[in-house]
Image (cartoon, coloured by chain):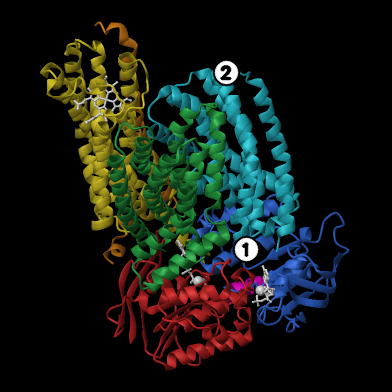
Chain colours: A green, B cyan, C orange, D yellow, E red, F blue
Amino acid sequence: MTALAALFVRDVRLAIRVGGGGGIGVLFFLIVVTLMPFAIGPDLALLGRIGPAILWLGALLASLLTLDRLLAMDQEDGSLDLMLTGRSPLELAVAAKALAHWLTTGLPLVIAAPLLGLFLNLDLGSSGAVALTLLAGTPALTFIGLIGAALSVTLRRGGLLLAVLVMPLTVPVLIFGVAASNAALVGPLPFGTPFTILCALTLISIVVGTFAAATALRHGME
Amino acid sequence: MTALAALFVRDVRLAIRVGGGGGIGVLFFLIVVTLMPFAIGPDLALLGRIGPAILWLGALLASLLTLDRLLAMDQEDGSLDLMLTGRSPLELAVAAKALAHWLTTGLPLVIAAPLLGLFLNLDLGSSGAVALTLLAGTPALTFIGLIGAALSVTLRRGGLLLAVLVMPLTVPVLIFGVAASNAALVGPLPFGTPFTILCALTLISIVVGTFAAATALRHGME
Amino acid sequence: MNLGPHAPFIVAAYGIATFVIGALIAWVMLDHRAQLRALDDLELRGVTRRSDRAPEKTA
Amino acid sequence: MPIIDLANPTRFLRFAERALPWLAGLTLLAFAAGLNLTLGAPDDYQQGATVKIMFIHVPSAWLGMGIWALMTIAALGTLVWRHPLADVAAKAAAPVGAAFTLLCLVTGSLWGRPMWGAYWVWDARLTSVLVLFLMYLGVMALWRTVDDPARAGRAAAILTLVGAINLPIIKFSVDWWNTLHQPASVLRLAGPSIHPSILIPLLAMTLAFVLLFLALHLAAMRNEILRRRVRSLMMMQAQTAPGSGS
Amino acid sequence: MRLLGTQLVCVRGGRQVFAGLDFDVGAGEALVVTGRNGAGKSSLLRMIAGFVRTAGGLLELRHGDPELTLPEQAHYLGHQDALKPSLSVAENLDFWARYLGAEAPGRDGLEAVGLGAVAALPAAYLSAGQRRRLSIARLVAVQRPLWLLDEPTSALDRAAQETLAGLMRAHLAGGGLIVAAAHGPIGLADTKELRLEEAP
Amino acid sequence: MRLLGTQLVCVRGGRQVFAGLDFDVGAGEALVVTGRNGAGKSSLLRMIAGFVRTAGGLLELRHGDPELTLPEQAHYLGHQDALKPSLSVAENLDFWARYLGAEAPGRDGLEAVGLGAVAALPAAYLSAGQRRRLSIARLVAVQRPLWLLDEPTSALDRAAQETLAGLMRAHLAGGGLIVAAAHGPIGLADTKELRLEEAP
Ligand code: HEM
Ligand SMILES: Nc1ncnc2c1ncn2[C@@H]1O[C@H](COP(=O)(O)OP(=O)(O)OP(=O)(O)O)[C@@H](O)[C@H]1O
Ligand SMILES: Nc1ncnc2c1ncn2[C@@H]1O[C@H](COP(=O)(O)OP(=O)(O)OP(=O)(O)O)[C@@H](O)[C@H]1O
Ligand SMILES: [Mg+2]
Ligand SMILES: [Mg+2]
């Protein structure tokens, strides 16, 4: 377990030193939120209605586009080779990396959501609900993206291709994430139903993503 | 001139081989547009109204997030060193790279815009107008991003943090791009005013981006 | 035959289907020819086919 | 190593050469019969003659989904049993599957215009089929951008397996979304209410489409095997060429 | 302990690199793999380390720890240094020591390779030879019986080459195994040699 | 032609690497820079190539092309190979030849370093020595008077080391200049030596 903890700590440290942490994600969302009124016009009701959807879309894009570097960098400098000679199962190692990624890109977004909700004219309760859906759902995005990251390592390909490969898989997460947010904001459906499904999707993604990524890495090493 | 042409061709080739080609760019935006109704709900009128904003946001994300690799990869493998011993001015070399990047990520979006318009229930004229704003505006995103890319190369630690500081510069481009699109779609403002400003912003960005990036690289070499 | 007021849509559907299926058939046939030509090319240059060199594949 | 060991594929090639003409003939016969029945089918009392679009729309839809299911089995063949023909089958099936899915989308759109007044509506079924189409394109792009077939095969297999989760989602998302937005026009004809006078031509056309797929798939697999043979010969040539050392 | 390779076949990128390769290294023995550029030396080491799949033949470590796989008992030192430029020298070594199984990583490894003075610098500041030394420190920080060294002396100065030779001698004396790829002498007295010939 | 360094000072990452360094290389001469790991050999080469700024002293190339700067008349061969894995061997060389100023790049360079047979392979498939050979082919593909070589023999097998020595001899015979950093012999008979001592 200390091996995995070491990996997790290293990745968080790297993200903070190199990438400036979750700063880029939060800033991006600030810009999105600032921009939306220009696109829609100053219709506050409408803004509140599509706000969660926009936040979710942004989270999705930001996760997928940054994820392909997660494993590729470790491959380029030989770290991935050495990781394979470690004694922790590759599945757990890969999961530790994904967790570190989520902590540094997904979580800042969750934390910023209530603030952004203020800009979008949401009351505090609703903002909290949206943040909750993001908290429950963004790990799924990370772990689905992990599959793409592993494939991009084995193929020595990156960029948009991998985003394209895994994006269709994120559709259900997006649907239920937004559905749960909207349920909390405007009703009439209960919040619980889509939220439960969202949580289930996240659990499934964590399992499937971890195993698929480890399998891809094992089959793709050279 | 052949030196710059060679650089341009190499970068386009790399983008096509590594990222899967211009087709992938189109596919990426197709997926973004496909995801939107899942997030917002299939309200065609609303989709049409915020469609241009979403396209612009997607373009911004795709540009900025892929751009920081543009120069960083060249630095990691030593290409940037050798480029400095070349006989073409660094400004032009950097501009050639940015152009190649735009051709492989920005242009596909412009080309796909009319098709995407179809999905968003726009008529052909409006689709054309949106495509036109993208054609005029996406180069600005690339060249502004170029500054961030150069900074992230020269400042190994916290480089991306500075790239984040560049992002606010893209806000005016987004605002006028979306404004021009909306003017074409729904009025009541004339299309020409924001469009002219957009073009001016692009020209300024090209000049400033090129010089700023080259200066940053020159001062940051080690 | 009377296809009613929406004849263009029906005709277009069948037309496009014919075209797509035709394109698939053309793709398969042209690809076949291209591969055969590449194999002939290689044979001309003296690269022998694997199946003609029996001993190697017992390993 | 599928590229190195083409022993079985050689036998497969011989089989394909022999089977293809028969399969092609059968397909032609089935289409002749199916189209003949189609011409004789009565118009629907609500949809008029546009119901004729169904005879290509529905078989395409079924094939589009069925081919992904087939690719899923092939993916298991690649990863679990390491069958040398499995990734050949998967690669050959993808473009055909994409084409049928495209046909489903296009004919559906052409049907939708007179029925719903729009070519495209963001209905669950339409969108999920579009997602299927995009995944086909993704897999094809993956095959196209990676030059080493063994490598590409394993990666595509993993993607296909993961993507198979999408098949039930395509099926069931209708229900989730119906509760939210979509008018029930798609489902109006569905179910046991289909009259035999329409059902029989539909089944005949479906048979013809399946035969067509089998023929195309067999031919595409043959092409793929030949392509790999060309590649491995070229590799061998690069290796044995004079002066490869120093 | 005994590392045995029998009739190994290696295929990379669809091309056969070598075939029918046999070798045998016992405890306290060092095997030096030689051959022209592209002969497959690195490929062989990567195969032993488990990164490249065998296309035929058998590879086994006899009398090793039965709970662990072959790669888990090996140290691989390749051309890439697996260092993160933004982490400090000590942090880099610490991470690998922990990840590869050391209980409490100390700074002895750094002192042994003469990097004690730069422990706090980011790895980005290291010279080529210093990077290499840092990789070598990994071998000392975690005990593993089999060392796979790919051109270990490259970029090292005389002093560091001698340090490395000393470490290797100590490892062999303790019953360790070494398989090294090299174009010249690696500083060990009696070694077995495995010469990879021209591909067929 | 004459490369002159007077009282050079080098500072990297805020730390002084060397100071008061003098050297002088004439046409047809080779200067070998030696010293322990971290002494500043690579830093000196990178300074001459214009990548590292001088913190003091003067660096000049006398009787060179007056229209060109010093870096524009130099070939730099460093530890990194500047190769793109997804481009083929020939494409990689072609690009650098064109970019660095060759009119019509041919395949002679590849043949000269023994890579003719793998010209069509992606560079990702190359072994360490083959990558190095490809970098060396650049020196031949474009004519430049000053060669800056950082440990040029690393990863090369005997045959390739001799090829490289032959290329260097030919370059010197044609009036070229070479500054090379090395830990051992580089295969040239009479060379000047510049020994970088312990930093203060
Ligand atoms: C682009 C638009 C469309 C797409 C992507 C599409 C997709 C599909 C799919 C995937 C199926 C197979 C469903 C299954 O087997 O469960 C299907 C079946 C069917 N579609 Fe469409 N469809 C479209 C438009 C339409 C339109 C406009 C109509 C008629 C108004 C229509 C009528 C039908 C019918 C009658 C079936 C057969 C259902 C059954 O008996 O199981 N479709 N379509
Ligand atoms: N990018 C850098 N930033 C800061 N300091 C650096 C950088 N690169 C090297 N240094 C420092 O400069 C000094 C000299 O490094 P240099 O690479 O020139 O050594 P070298 O003589 O080439 O050593 P080697 O034999 O290991 O290649 C070292 O102390 C090193 O830590
Ligand atoms: N990642 C790879 N993919 C495909 N082929 C590869 C790969 N790496 C190496 N090869 C090929 O395998 C063969 C052996 O390479 P390897 O790196 O084992 O050689 P080597 O003996 O270590 O050479 P060197 O002395 O140059 O290090 C070469 O022909 C090379 O082109
Ligand atoms: Mg090697
Ligand atoms: Mg050095």
Q: Amino acid at mark 1?
A: Ser
| C56 in the magenta segment | no
Instruction: Give the residue displayed 28% in from the left and 78% down from the top.
Output: E67
Q: Quadrant of residue E45?
A: bottom left
Q: Which residue is mark 1?
A: F135
Image coordinates for residue B4, horizontal then vertical, percent: 69, 46
Q: Quadrant of residue E87?
A: bottom right
Q: Which mark is residue B187?
A: 2
Span shown in magenta: F158-165
The residue lying toward the viewer, choosing from A9 and F54, is: A9
Vertical placement of residue E159 versus C24, above or below? below
The amino acid type, in three-letter code, at marker 2 is Gly
- Quarter of the image containing the N terminus of chain D? bottom left
Whether residue F12 is situated above or below residue C50 in the rendered picture: below
Discs 2 and 1 share one subunit: no
Q: Residue at x 53, y 73 (%)?
A: E91
Q: Secondary structure beneath disc 1?
A: helix
Specify few, some or many for label 1: CA neighbours under 10 Å numbering under 14, 14-19, or 20 or more. many
Q: Chain of mark 1?
A: F
Q: Is residue A63 above or below residue B111?
A: below
Q: Pick the residue in front: D11 or B36.
A: B36
The residue closer to the viewer here, E69 or A94, is A94
Question: Does the residue tagged 2 have its C-beta within 8 Å of any atom of ligand 1?
Answer: no
Image quarter for ligand 2 equals bottom right
The reply, left or right, for residue F107 in relation to residue D224 is right
The percent position of residue D236, horizontal first and vertical second, equals: 42, 58
- Identify the element where label 2 is drawn: loop
Quarter occupied by residue D134: top left
Q: Where the C terminus of chain D falls, by quadrant? A: bottom right
Label 2 crowd (10 A; few <14 / some 14-19 / many >=20)? few
Q: Chain of mark 2?
A: B
Q: Is residue A107 visible?
A: yes
